[in-house]
Image: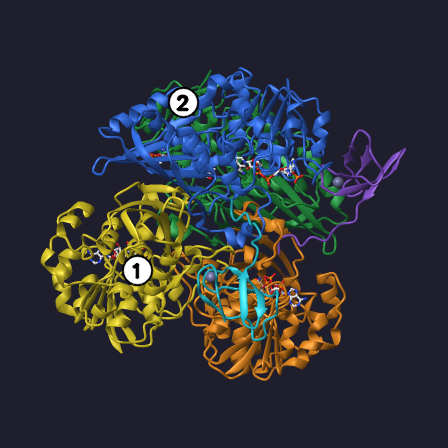
Chain colours: A green, B yellow, C orange, D blue, E cyan, F purple
Amino acid sequence: MLRVAIVGASGYIGGELLRLLHGHPRVTVVAATSDRLAGRRVDGPHPNLRGHTDLCFVGHDAVEDAGADVLLLAAPHRETMGRMAGYLTLAGTVIDLSGDFRLRDPGTYAAYYGVPHTAPHLIPGFTTGLPEWHRAELAAADRISVPGCMATAGILAVRPMAEAGLIEGPVQVDARTGSSGSGASGGPAAAHAERSGALRVFAPSRHRHEAEIAQATGHTVRMTATGVEAVRGVQVVCHAKLAPGASERDVRAAFHAAYADEPFVRVVARRQGLYRLPEPKILTGSNHCDVGFAVFADDGTVVLVGALDNLVKGGAGGAVQCLNVRFGWPERTGLEFPGLHPN
Amino acid sequence: MLRVAIVGASGYIGGELLRLLHGHPRVTVVAATSDRLAGRRVDGPHPNLRGHTDLCFVGHDAVEDAGADVLLLAAPHRETMGRMAGYLTLAGTVIDLSGDFRLRDPGTYAAYYGVPHTAPHLIPGFTTGLPEWHRAELAAADRISVPGCMATAGILAVRPMAEAGLIEGPVQVDARTGSSGSGASGGPAAAHAERSGALRVFAPSRHRHEAEIAQATGHTVRMTATGVEAVRGVQVVCHAKLAPGASERDVRAAFHAAYADEPFVRVVARRQGLYRLPEPKILTGSNHCDVGFAVFADDGTVVLVGALDNLVKGGAGGAVQCLNVRFGWPERTGLEFPGLHPN
Amino acid sequence: MLRVAIVGASGYIGGELLRLLHGHPRVTVVAATSDRLAGRRVDGPHPNLRGHTDLCFVGHDAVEDAGADVLLLAAPHRETMGRMAGYLTLAGTVIDLSGDFRLRDPGTYAAYYGVPHTAPHLIPGFTTGLPEWHRAELAAADRISVPGCMATAGILAVRPMAEAGLIEGPVQVDARTGSSGSGASGGPAAAHAERSGALRVFAPSRHRHEAEIAQATGHTVRMTATGVEAVRGVQVVCHAKLAPGASERDVRAAFHAAYADEPFVRVVARRQGLYRLPEPKILTGSNHCDVGFAVFADDGTVVLVGALDNLVKGGAGGAVQCLNVRFGWPERTGLEFPGLHPN
Amino acid sequence: MLRVAIVGASGYIGGELLRLLHGHPRVTVVAATSDRLAGRRVDGPHPNLRGHTDLCFVGHDAVEDAGADVLLLAAPHRETMGRMAGYLTLAGTVIDLSGDFRLRDPGTYAAYYGVPHTAPHLIPGFTTGLPEWHRAELAAADRISVPGCMATAGILAVRPMAEAGLIEGPVQVDARTGSSGSGASGGPAAAHAERSGALRVFAPSRHRHEAEIAQATGHTVRMTATGVEAVRGVQVVCHAKLAPGASERDVRAAFHAAYADEPFVRVVARRQGLYRLPEPKILTGSNHCDVGFAVFADDGTVVLVGALDNLVKGGAGGAVQCLNVRFGWPERTGLEFPGLHPN
Amino acid sequence: MVTCPECESAVVPAATPVIGEIVECGECASELEILTLDPVRAALAPEIEEDWGE
Amino acid sequence: MVTCPECESAVVPAATPVIGEIVECGECASELEILTLDPVRAALAPEIEEDWGE
Ligand SMILES: NC(=O)c1ccc[n+]([C@@H]2O[C@H](COP(=O)([O-])OP(=O)(O)OC[C@H]3O[C@@H](n4cnc5c(N)ncnc54)[C@H](OP(=O)(O)O)[C@@H]3O)[C@@H](O)[C@H]2O)c1
Ligand SMILES: NC(=O)c1ccc[n+]([C@@H]2O[C@H](COP(=O)([O-])OP(=O)(O)OC[C@H]3O[C@@H](n4cnc5c(N)ncnc54)[C@H](OP(=O)(O)O)[C@@H]3O)[C@@H](O)[C@H]2O)c1
Ligand SMILES: NC(=O)c1ccc[n+]([C@@H]2O[C@H](COP(=O)([O-])OP(=O)(O)OC[C@H]3O[C@@H](n4cnc5c(N)ncnc54)[C@H](OP(=O)(O)O)[C@@H]3O)[C@@H](O)[C@H]2O)c1
Ligand SMILES: NC(=O)c1ccc[n+]([C@@H]2O[C@H](COP(=O)([O-])OP(=O)(O)OC[C@H]3O[C@@H](n4cnc5c(N)ncnc54)[C@H](OP(=O)(O)O)[C@@H]3O)[C@@H](O)[C@H]2O)c1
Ligand SMILES: [Zn+2]
Ligand SMILES: [Zn+2]
């Protein structure tokens, strides 16, 4: 059994890591950290784990004594970069879920996160934790940075077009997210009576994740983000100009070429039924990212849609998938849950 | 114009008082208090009032200088009783929305609120702010205590049966409430990701409002309260034993006798359609309380249902209705909004 | 009292017209039509009206005998155009809420509605029912066509920029809508278990209302529409390129110039608080349309946001506002409800 | 591999059976029936199964040719009893999810279902499909009738008290259910704009499932059912009188005695945290039923709470659990998903 | 005017009632069928079974 | 096996296809009508207009 420690295990991503790893046959969780809840049972903040585990939290620093083979970091961005050098000494493999090591360029980081990067020399050592586009490197990677939730949906939806040269110019990404995307400590904006039924355009443009999508696709990206009524779930609706001559058939072919053999990406672009384009509600709990498209020949535009569960494929599930790739296990291990309908 | 001051105007009840009084042709709001937001515009925490008012908050103590004819108190229970003696010197009429002066017996208060009452001598001076059952007294009352939101629904649903001697023995009240019932400062339990979709039995029995219903009906009451997915809205489903010989016709007649001329109570007990018994969702924003019943002759039981908007008929609207009664204005003044469907 | 007849009174728009006109001091409803429910009480399908009216439906054809001064048409598009010639003989003023007489060009109608227009000669006689931009004409108009719900939000958000020459090139409109937008007869797609929590991109581009926004603004419009978790409410998020030299100050000034004196349009673009940009949840039941903006000088783009209640400002409320303008009454008459918070 | 056929596979229970059996290592689905969708892919109505199966529906009668070892019946009640004799000839084991063979007494059936039972001679052959209370019989049963969703929650919550003699007299059950409880063909009452936010007391008393709970516990049961805002999820809140001398300790001990070794029943009765009593939202997709209690010594009453996902433990999952028991497989096989938090 | 047999409320049929017409009780929403015109008498219309909710 | 005219995916009809039968493309969910059996050929089935969503 591989020994895994989770830093930031009391948060929403931490809880999801606990859930997934608990069901993973090759892994044992040796430490789950929280300063706030040190000594308490993990099934307190994560009541779905009742009856499944007797694990208790340890303080963040106790991860040093955990003897872990792998460290999964689910701590806040800006907090993570300063501690990374230390984490790297503690385990052979480190998988970071924060935003701190996703952007290759420290200048871009500073522009989007509002603070200078404090460990820029460590950035180049990280591999992007997106198996669909980095599987080979991940198989040998010891430092992995998992993309953001909206970024994952955006990259999976846009990159096949970009790689195939089927779009040109800037991409407008309209992202929608549930309340769990802000983590367990949302503050007054997260109060149910305020957040319920919201259509809150909290980032009318320049949302952080646009830098990740731009980096992964080579296109200029403008990204709007709206908080919608949902706990889990992210959807991106992306607008781009088709390259001259690109047809719907080319688009479909490009998606198939990219994802036909992917265990967790489904191409959803249907002409009938209720679920014609990707929607997060049937993906809750699942590691799927659904991607789809609609081509408008009349004015040469394409709409690309991606959907996922931010805590699974957009976070903890993506990290576990990387772990599977890294250790040569079947990629679906521990990630079999297909999602629910109705839901 | 009557000069009204609102203490605790930054909260949810305070905001609703501002909304209703803004639309009231005979009232002007001379002070709206908040320590937390003193000096800020009231349309900050109450964005629905944008464009309707330029009022700003003053600190709680500034109410002393407001020269108000009427004080509306929307401060927390336990906080209100200690300050009441002071408030009573400030205005000719005081209408309290907290729980502190609802129960006639200080011992009962202590049992339900967990602290002794600190101003028991002031309790007898208060009239219950429920026009349906205390209209005549309210017309001359200078100290009014508005019942709790679930209590209002419960009393309006149960009391006609009790008065007519149609039920006997204890009454089981199953109350359901939206998240605004906890006010604007709900803490971690109020976070959207936790509260959303909840069916939280936060009081499996002995909810505070049971004492109010018992006091108003003369029956022993056992009350369960569950937080449900909604921002506004309260519903009570009450179970009682019919008195020997009581028939469905008697029940209907008793409800009609009690409420036929009431401007804000509708008897809803229908044999077809989607909305056969009272439901809060079509009452949002309205001052109606719908009450209904279903009689089971086979085992001699009756189910009584009440529904309202906790911030309106169950709070601010009830207070404004009392104000109208007290000052001899048409009772519907400022309370005309009928509620929405669909919603 | 003005005698008003409502055609299609059993639907969601029809019900909202009944609610608003019931509260309107200058109007009496002389007929409410439904073939499906002829003879039944209007408070059956519209339970919020219980206790407010004893009106019953008459069949659609019975409108001929109603002796109405004004006809309000809330029937389906494609059904309305064929009957319009007849309706025009029945009353001096006709206000149509369907899509059939909104587009000036029958060819555009055919392209967007999929059928040829069967009464193109009647189109020029209609005035657009949007007081903010057509108040003077409406004061004398006998045939009024109220814009679509998403179109209203889109036009109010985009047109000040267009008029002031502050944007150039095509406008991308991302619209979101609640389930009541499909009316009362939604079919299987409308089932709660399927529609609940949806983020359904039912029109990835080319939504019908884009033609209305294009017509009103003179810009090319591309419009995406997504069904979101809500019963009422529409929001549009629009992306455009700023004209060279246009600054945030210019944008704000243009919005203020356009709407400073409007009773129902509020400019919402705030730097703090929870509700910084327009959101429909606090507009439920209200006739307000909130509009806002965010300017991005770095790449010369602007994001324009509009929000409203599709059944009120985006439908029945807009029609009543037109009625007020047409008959010279204060524009707010019957439309005073400010909306709720929290909600 | 065991060959299983599903009758009524296009419905919500049918879809859930497909999901669970697809992930079950010992079972292969040889037929999935629907007349309405015969020939169509099962991932049409069940979009969560995309990418997981290429199965297509066959007509209901085609189940005769399926060569199934086990028949899982997810057809409507009243429809199932007439066809049961035929089904019993088709496979060695038949597991029925409808209500038709749950009640031992045909007279009770007639009273609750409004029609006489047409196959009363077959009733005694059925074993109740609730492993927690019938595990030994189920291991050898060829005809299994799975209890109703609310009945399962009610029985699991109440029966330990009844068996231990800790309660006396009638039990009041207040049940709450999501919209999927009505199946995929809900009609106008199921429309999102009507059902959304509902607190619909559709059975103020005498709900069908009360007969099942009465039968299983030996107590008189009165059951109220309310449709709440949720797609999945059932909760029961049950009120009973404690037997003289019964203490909280006795209650807790009885629950533990009953369920300590159960794989899918958790006793949840906590004194702190947000999830102190059972709530369905964290059980979505899981086969758990959480049960809990609160004892009120002052007046000798107990409140018993149960929660589950109606489509899983309250339906398809319960059936799969029975299948596991019947064929001697580990009871958790195919049912490992623990549920999600937050959700 | 007829009396609702279900709840005894007064129900006002249309100005010119027709035999067989259905009127609705405003109180309990029962559907009444007009049986005779002079005097106007009505009885409960047969109920269509509705599975309301569950 | 036939090719979906909409998206060019391979669509496998039932073991014993029948003329006029509708098969569904697993890829784009287009509905295809079987036109001939030997060889098996199919064309897009006429679309029923669905007002999907709005
Ligand atoms: N939520 C999502 O959808 C999502 C998706 C992908 C990635 N992410 C990223 O994942 C990370 C965690 O997100 P979350 O949503 O789970 O947040 P969260 O619910 O707020 O949890 C934060 C966790 O970080 C811990 N923590 C706080 N300060 C720390 C420090 N200085 N060192 C170590 N641990 C610290 C907290 O522990 P205490 O109990 O001691 O406070 C808590 O366990 C963030 O970087 C976030 O950007 C989130
Ligand atoms: N919510 C309901 O459904 C409902 C219904 C009926 C009755 N009530 C009762 O109405 C009252 C207000 O409830 P709410 O829901 O509006 O609560 P809330 O949203 O939490 O607001 C509380 C208000 O009280 C003020 N306040 C706090 N401490 C105070 C003090 N010592 N003296 C004066 N004011 C103080 C706060 O002002 P700062 O801004 O300075 O903090 C705030 O304005 C409570 O007594 C509640 O029980 C509530
Ligand atoms: N829903 C919105 O948000 C919204 C907003 C703005 C504008 N609109 C427009 O307003 C109109 C009504 O929309 P809705 O949402 O209220 O629809 P709805 O709920 O489906 O109601 C449709 C109404 O039209 C009546 N009707 C059907 N066929 C008719 C015919 N041939 N002649 C006359 N009446 C007929 C129906 O009466 P029966 O009872 O006899 O079937 C019903 O009263 C539509 O044109 C829609 O596009 C809707
Ligand atoms: N929903 C729940 O929470 C729940 C929980 C426990 C038990 N149940 C029970 O499970 C059964 C199915 O419920 P559901 O919610 O899945 O209902 P549903 O979604 O309405 O599905 C009904 C299914 O039954 C099929 N069917 C209809 N008439 C039939 C007949 N005469 N013979 C065979 N099949 C027939 C339908 O096939 P077509 O496609 O041909 O119409 C459809 O597949 C019901 O008996 C219900 O009481 C439901
Ligand atoms: Zn009646
Ligand atoms: Zn195809």
Observer-nearest of C208 and C25: C25
Choose top left, top right, bottom left or bottom right for residue D166.
Answer: top left
Q: Which mark is residue D171?
A: none
Badge 2 marks a residue whose secondary structure is: loop
Q: Nearer the viewer, mark 2 or mark 1?
A: 1
Q: Are marks 2 and 1 in contact (CB under 8 Å)?
A: no
Residue under pointer 2:
A89
User: Which amino acid type corresponds to the residue marked 2 in the rendered image?
Assistant: Thr
| Residue A264 horizontal/vertical position (percent) | 60, 32
> Do tags 2 and 1 sit on the same chain?
no
Residue under pointer 1:
B315
Badge 1 marks a residue whose secondary structure is: helix
Q: Residues within 10 Å of mark 2 (few under 14, many from 20)?
A: few
The subunit letter for the residue under badge 1 reads B
Observer-nearest of B160 and B35: B160
User: Which amino acid type corresponds to the residue marked 1 in the rendered image?
Assistant: Gly
Observer-nearest of B272 and C249: B272
Q: Specify the farthest residue to the left.
A: B121
